[in-house]
Amino acid sequence: MCAQPSPDAVSSGETGTVVLDARDINRALTRISHEILERNKGAADLVLLGIPTRGVHLARRIAARISATEGVDVPVGALDVTMYRDDLRKHPARTPQPTELPPGGVDGRTVVLVDDVLYSGRTVRAALDAMNDIGRPDVVRLAVLVDRGHRQLPIRADHVGKNLPSARTERVMVRLDDLDGIEEVRIASGGDLS
Amino acid sequence: MRRHLLSVDDLSADDIETLFATAAEMHDVQRREVKKLPALRGRTVINLFFEDSTRTRSSFEIAGKWLSADTINITGKGSSASKGESLRDTVLTIAAMGVDALVMRHSASGAAHQVSQWVDAAVINAGDGTHEHPSQALLDAYTLQRRLGSLEGRHVVIVGDLTHSRVFRSNVKCLATLGARVTVVAPPTLMPSGVASWSAAQGFATSWDLDEVLPTADAVMMLRVQRERMSGGYFPSAREYTVGYGLTRDRLAVLGPDVPICHPGPMNRGLEIAADAADAAQSAILDQVSAGVAVRMSILYHLLAGEGAVS
């Protein structure tokens, strides 16, 4: 998925179609933040865990919106899933990213996993396994900026920024201002990036 | 990264940084309640040790177990090697059981390299004679980098029995790759012969005078006096060695309070290192041990987890 920034994705930046621009992303994240609060009936016991790399940035933005709305700080962390992936042997060994848990941990909390793109569902499965090793949340939910379909596992998102019907041969690229210097979601034809 | 880890020469500066980045994450896992990652599930790692070892063997074993590999220890003394089986037959027998990695220590320099040509498994050199001990050099550099921030331009002083030290041979290469300035100090009898041309090629300095070098040290690495490899005559007495080359209480006072003190262990307290220095607040000796597990997890992960890893 788009978790690994690849030079390839940057060079092909001018191809394809922009499906979400900066304002669309902004609105989607605001809506997701409100949905999370509605579903959770407030910000109590909430913990946001982003899946590196872009999921972490999105989780921080959602947390900022929640604290702006509710006036409380929501703990944010990062959950790396590299070591839990089922496709480790299909790629050269990747360097794991930091896993950072907020001071209160996840035990007994409502954890919202945040990722940029939901595709096969394998990353989320790996994240659930990783979660198992760091604690026992009360509830785990999933928020994604883009759901592009083509699930290979019985996994669904609770909060979706945009449902984006796509062909398996297409590529979906999420770019965020703080990482990529541009804010957009773009879809392009190209190799299957599963 | 290559398929085996036989020498620090196998690693570029980028490879070392990659290993350290992964090791830093593994270090965090060490502090968790559940210290287990599934990355090497179903892989088998054999520790084949023909020489004594506490920390290297146990930390490779723990590293493998925390990555969910099955790890087995075979020691020379309890194996068929003590019945006269050749090294080749021993490793071929073990390889035939279907192992993914052989972590090997042997008293002959080049043994790991030789074995890597006989088997399909990844071979990790855990010390071969007086040649190399790459995982030790990596964990030393990792420990120092965490203490000092960066090794670029820092002055690392390595002191002790250089002639017999594989740790020193691996360390000068690894530290040089990371940009550190290295000075090695030993009595003339324990300075390897021909070190001059070698030190020029690898860019480290040599000295016989510890007191001259110590004041500019950013880090000090004491090496063990390897009595088991000496047939005597290297120095007149243990007392004389300590006076000339031991990290004594007086020399500890010369070091700045933030200068890390390393020792690969096992220590001869009172010989090459005084108890005051070994137990000082600035001592990094126990940090080295915990870094050892993290660095070895990183090595096993990068050699075994990805595509192209032996199966």
Image (cartoon, rainbow, N blue to C red):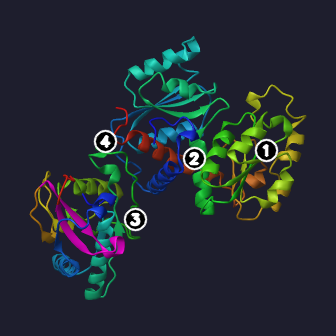
Residue B307 in percent (x, y) is at 33, 40
Where is mark 3, residue-wise?
Answer: A100
The answer to if A182 sits in the magenta stretch is yes
Task: Name the chain letter of the residue that bears numbered label 2.
Answer: B
In space, the residues marked 3 and 1 are separated at their CA atoms by 41 Å
Determine the residue positioned at 47% across, 43% down.
B299
Residue B253 in percent (x, y) is at 82, 61
Task: Name the chain letter of the residue that bears numbered label 4.
Answer: A
Q: Is residue B3 visible?
A: yes
Q: Is residue A139 visible?
A: no
Residue sitting nearer the eye, B246 or A18: A18
For disc 4, the neighbor class at 10 Å (few under 14, some 14 to 19, many from 20) is: some
Q: In this rendering, which labeled residue sits more in front, label 4 or label 1?
A: 4
Q: Which residues are magenta?
A: A168-188
Task: Name the chain letter of the residue that bears numbered label 1.
Answer: B
Where is mark 4, residue-wise?
Answer: A89
Residue sitting nearer the eye, A143 or B66: A143
Determine the residue positioned at 60% across, 51% down.
B141
The answer to if A153 sits in the magenta stretch is no
Where is mark 1, residue-wise?
Answer: B272
For disc 3, the neighbor class at 10 Å (few under 14, some 14 to 19, many from 20) is: some
Q: Is residue A86 left or right of residue B106?
A: left
Callout 4 secondary element: helix
